[in-house]
Image (tube, helix red, strand yellow):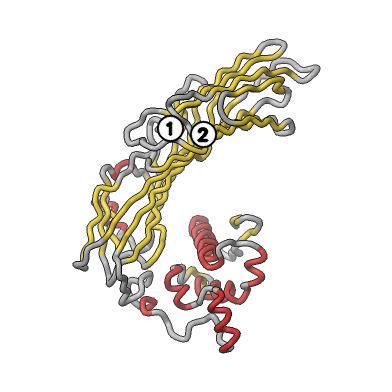
Amino acid sequence: HIQVHDLFILTPINQETPPLLVFEFLNRFAAILQEYFGEVSEDTIRDNFTTVYLILDEVVDHGHPFNTESNILEAMIRPPTVLNKLLQSVRGSTTLAETLPDGSLSNIPWRKSNVQHTSNEFHLDFNETLSAIIDKNGMVEHCVIDGEVLAVSALSGTPDLTLSFVDPHLIDDCGVHPCVRYKRWENEKLVSFVPPDGPFKLMTYRSVPTNAPLPLYVKPTVSLGQDGGKIEVMVGPKALPGLVKPVEDVVVHIHLPRNINFSSLTTNQGTVQFDESSKICKWTIGRLVKEKVPNLTGTMTYTEGTSCPEERPHAVAEFNVTGYAVSGLKVDSLNLLNERYKTRKGARYSSKSGRIQIYT
């Protein structure tokens, strides 16, 4: 099963089944519901139960995943818009289409036939999440980057696209949309595909760099004695190739052992909040600028009857940065075949933190 907000979506199985197949199907089904209703909650499932039942009847055929392409599903089962609900109440019709969509029986079922657009555009969004563990000496013990490529296609006809990267070997593992010719990716490291019409997820990938390409540094210094201790945390941006825009939404969480309290906390930028129950100090910095180095200092005391703990405080950092891919992945070219019109193409990059732990 998987959890989506407050809902649990589960699949009963009566025979040996590959676990990844089940999880992939559940996540795909949750994504389809998200596209149809905007959010997946108990209320939306209850209010649109008929539509959910029809979707489930299409995505599963005799216990096997069947049609999980949102473009084809939306052509067969109309989304519950205000206009569709009005027509349904006036005409007494159902949300199920009377005829099969054009592409459902073709060799490219993810794309409708005879697609026409006045302005032919194709855009890519590279979203990456960096997770890392950094020891007290500032050395990286573990680092992994999870990325996804979201595409929006508004191309006429049946375009055949080829996407190439400057350094495709930065990708250690990946999963691709069914439209991608996977053999060509394995042999030539080229993403060759006929895209669906509209928004879709082209691929997901994972990169495991030797060094954590963090766009900021976090330097916590902790000294503990018999009666208490002090902590100082410095945060600042790093000068990395390709990093032009400032690092934003910076938050540092300082986790303390159970028998330690803060007696004083001061900072020269942002706000500080300390939760006594969870022993977590939340330092909200915001945007990092080169002219000013954020600094946090605090005095720590022990709970009465306790002494210096063996466990050390540690920090967890959060950030967001646009226009920069922490993995270093960049688009080299995007070529269009089968069609002769001019295409507007573009790629955007963004990176954010997953779980970045800094030990002291």
The residue under the point 36% across, 68% down is 197
Three-letter amino acid code of the residue under disc 2: Ile
**As rendered, which of 83 and 60 lies closer to the eye?**
83
- Which amino acid lies under the numbered mark 1 shown in the image of this protein? Leu
Q: State the image coordinates of residue 162 (x, y, percent, origin top left).
A: 25, 57
Q: Residue at x 66, y 31 (%)?
A: 273
For this view, does 85 lie left or right of residue 329? right
Q: Quadrant of the C terminus?
A: top right
Which residue is located at x 54 percent, y 65 percent?
33
Residue 356: mark in rendering: 2
The reply to whether residue 17 is visible in this rendering is no
Q: Residue at x 61, y 76 (%)?
A: 50
Relative height, residue 35 to residue 292 (above, below): below
In the image, 241 versus 51, the foreground residue is: 241
Dot 2 and dot 1 residues touching (CB under 8 Å): yes
Q: 46 left or right of 20? A: right
Asked whether, in this view, residue 2 is left or right of residue 118, the answer is: right
Q: What is the C-alpha distance between the residues marked 2 and 1? A: 9 Å
Dot 1 falls on a residue whose secondary structure is loop
Pointer 1 residue: 214
Residue ranking furthest to the bottom: 91
